[in-house]
Image (tube, rainbow, N blue to C red):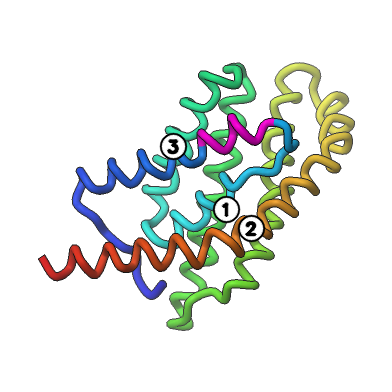
Amino acid sequence: MSTTIKFPPAKEIALIGILAALNITSRIYLQFLPNIKPVTSIIIISVLLFGLSFGIKLTFVTTIVSNVFLGMGLWTVFQILAWVVICLLTETVKRLFLLKKKSPPLLFMAIFSSLMGYVFGFVVSFEQLCYGGWGLFLPYWIAGLTFDTLHAGGNFFFYLICSPILMKVFKIEAKKLAKK
């Protein structure tokens, strides 16, 4: 991951569509597993491969379309905000490793992805500030830590599974595109 992979706009739209479809499908069909989905890991991988802008676009499409099926509400804004924060943190980590002219190690990024499960839960909990202030936010956030832990564990394993596959596939596509 020495540089960000750039695709022409039409190909970028197609990639966002494919990854969003994967995310949306997993959010819908894995509902029975609380907070255990590959979405956060795929968003992190997309930022590493395609850059911050791509990750944010993927976040918006994933969240809005999946919430059409799962339920739309104020939480949708906070889910988008949480994944955008994760995109920004991922971009920061990516740039720190680029300064050293290295790619982040797989295990390091799996742990990072795991920690982002807690970041996601923390940011999404801010929705409760709108309803009841800090008196509602704090107990809501604490009560959700079990679900955040499930999210974190899922992220760790999904990153370890998805990253090698997606990175390999998209790097091959980038090489094909570069030859044209």
Numbered marks: total: 3
Q: Amino acid at mark 3?
A: Ala
Residue 41: horizontal and vertical position, in percent? 57, 53
Looking at the image, residue 129 sits to the left or right of residue 75; the answer is: right
Q: Secondary structure at mark 1?
A: helix
Which label's residue is closer to the chain start, 2 or 1? 1
Any magenta on residue 20? no
Q: Which mark is residue 41?
A: 1
Q: Secondary structure at mark 2?
A: helix
Residue 156: horizontal and vertical position, in percent? 68, 59
Look at mark 3 in the image and give the residue it sits on. Answer: 21
Any magenta on residue 30? yes
Q: Quadrant of residue 5?
A: bottom left
Residue 51: horizontal and vertical position, in percent? 39, 56
Look at mark 2 in the image and give the residue it sits on. Answer: 113
Name which residue lies at 56% across and 36% down: 81
Q: Is residue 110 above or below residue 140?
A: below
Q: Amino acid at mark 1?
A: Ser
Of the two numbered discs 2 and 3 in the rendering, the one whose residue sits closer to the viewer: 3
Q: Quadrant of residue 175?
A: bottom left
**Start-end of magenta stretch:** 24-31
Looking at the image, residue 140 sits to the left or right of residue 83; the answer is: right
